[in-house]
Image (spheres, coloured by chain):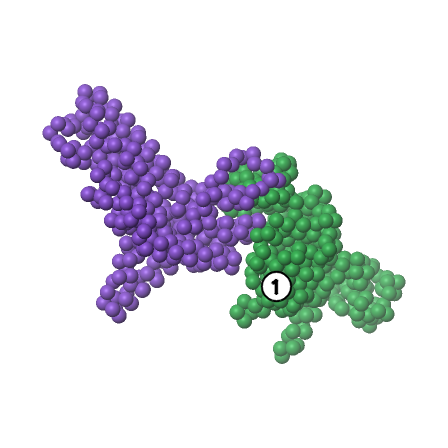
Chain colours: A green, B purple
Amino acid sequence: MTVIEARGLRKAFGTTVALDGVNLRVAEGRILGLIGPNGAGKTTALDAILGLIEFQGELRVLGRDPWTERDQLMRDVCFIADVALLPRWARVSQMLDYVGGVHPRFDRAKAESFLAKTDIRRTSRIRELSKGMVTQLHLALVMAIDAKLLVLDEPTLGLDILYRKQFYDSLLNDYFDRNRTIVVTTHQVEDVQNVITDLMFIHRGRIVLDCSMEEFESRYLEVSVHPERAAAARALQPIHERQLLGRSIFLFDHAANQKIDRQQLAAFGDLRTPSIADLFVALMGKYAGETQGATI
Amino acid sequence: MSTPSNAMPESSETTAPAAMSPAHPLYWSVRRELWENRSLYLAPLAAAGAALFGFLISMTGLAHWNLSTLHGMDQRDYIAKPYDITAGVMMATMILVTVFYCADALHGERRDRSILFWKSLPVSDLTTVLAKASIPFLVLPLLTFAIAVALQFIMLLLNSAVLLASGKNVAALWTQLSVTRMWLLLLYHLLTAHTLWPAPVYCWLLLVSGWARRATLLWAVLPIIVIAGVERLVFQTSHFAALVFARFIGDTPSIAMMAPDTFPTDPMTHITPGTFLSTPGLWVGLAIAAAFLAAAVRLRRYQTPV
């Protein structure tokens, strides 16, 4: 089943084009990481999916038009953005009451049992909680909702590594199953590398990479080469090269150069799957160069 | 009027989450307003407390009451004065709280970004706006009435106690005040002059609170001043300003009741709901109020944090 389907999704704010004809399809049971530099259009895409902004083009989320059917859609969709989103004046118990009162799929016992594992007191006001605690509270509320799609927009922004790790662990162990779908954007790409099943890069309102993590692992290879052999490796047309501790790190795209194979590369030095962050830097550098070249 | 009649269904804390009736989002949205805006009840309570304090001080003079020298309406006026004043204080408080609430109602959630959270729940924009509109149209009038009645009841008891203690006649107090009638008139006055009649003013404030990015009161008042100024320049008249002012502070008593005195608690007042309800001005005002609310509902779909 397709959870999100967009065709020619476009959104402009004045003269700034935030989404420039985005096509995407997210199937049920996937965890999609939407990665892009600041201002690439990530949040705009999520806002359109959540029915928070008007858009041009075609977009169906769980078979509904998010802009006109937001309230019905939200029975099956949950949303966590960065932590400043819960009302600061509210008490924890009030949040539980309210969500339980308005959401038909909220399981209060589940939220309570999740909160029991934290230091959050029911009587506290949200403004008194730390950033990490607010995220835990929001996660507790969301995980207790039997939703089909969870949208996370920089959910761990400003949190320390412990909270971030906990966040994704809870998400995977206590929440995610094959019937649910998650879309996450984050700048902390290293956190999600082992979480996501699909990867999408977005740049200047366009999707520039769309692949599953299996494809990612078979397609991109990184090899650390001794300087003496760097020239030979360079001849194989890597898509990116950087220096690290006196060695040259080459990044190869198997799809771009079919001739290379693993054994050939392994002969140059340590072979491994690149991190998403390294691929991101490599590809974004390339696109930045292209667009500059185009404007000059 | 678009006041939600099902805003306060019988509900308990233990309502099963699985079975949900359509009324629950509205009910919980009204609860949310009361949680968020504690001034809605704290301000009337504080005003009532202050009024009670003032009454206590004024009671020191009570022992010297000499009603026998006063007759008829004079006697009644003398007795009723503190009650009229406290009712007036409560009404003024209600107007003030209503104005400040409405001017912030759809702005606060955008200011603190929590609108993203509220919009991530299956609550429609219509429900949210109706819940906010129910505060000036239902919650505040009833709350103000309840607090005013409680306040005046305490005053009556204190009044009686002091009169008894000083060996004076208590009967005159209770007969002249005609308590039930006084309270019914107060409720009627609150609902007509300060709820239904100024409805377009309150709904205008709600609408502007959802539109303006900051300084909502400024943007609500500015168009009125500009229109009134232009009218004065072009036509040398001031109908618009008079119209808005009449709506806001309410010259309704003339059409809602026939009062010998200006104050509605006077027992000689005859309420004239028929006249009030058949005034075209009331229905025109309510239609404008409904249009403002409909615009506010539509506008909320576009609202994002400011």
* Number of other residues with Cα within 10 Å of mark 1, as a class: few under 14, some 14 to 19, many 20 or more: many
Give how far across and how far down residue A4 sits, in percent: 67, 58
What residue is shown with label 1? A41
Depth check: B82 or B71 in front? B71
Residue A5 appears in the rendering: yes
Which residue occupies 30% across, 36% down?
A: B183
Image quadrant assignment for residue A48? bottom right
Which residue occupies 35% across, 62% down?
A: B223
Q: Secondary structure at mark 1?
A: loop
Which residue occupies 80% across, 67% down?
A: A255
Residue A33 appears in the rendering: no
Give how far across and how far down residue B108 sits, in percent: 46, 51
Image quadrant assignment for residue B70? top left
Q: Where A29 falls versus B172 (above or below)?
A: below
Give how far across and how far down residue A97 sits, in percent: 55, 39
Image quadrant holding the N terminus of chain A, namely bottom right
Image quadrant holding the C terminus of chain A, namely bottom right
Which kind of residue does numbered mark 1 sit on?
Answer: Gly
Q: Is residue B151 rendered to the left or right of residue A141?
A: left
Depth check: A196 or A50 in front? A50
Give how far across and how far down residue B111 sits, in percent: 47, 53
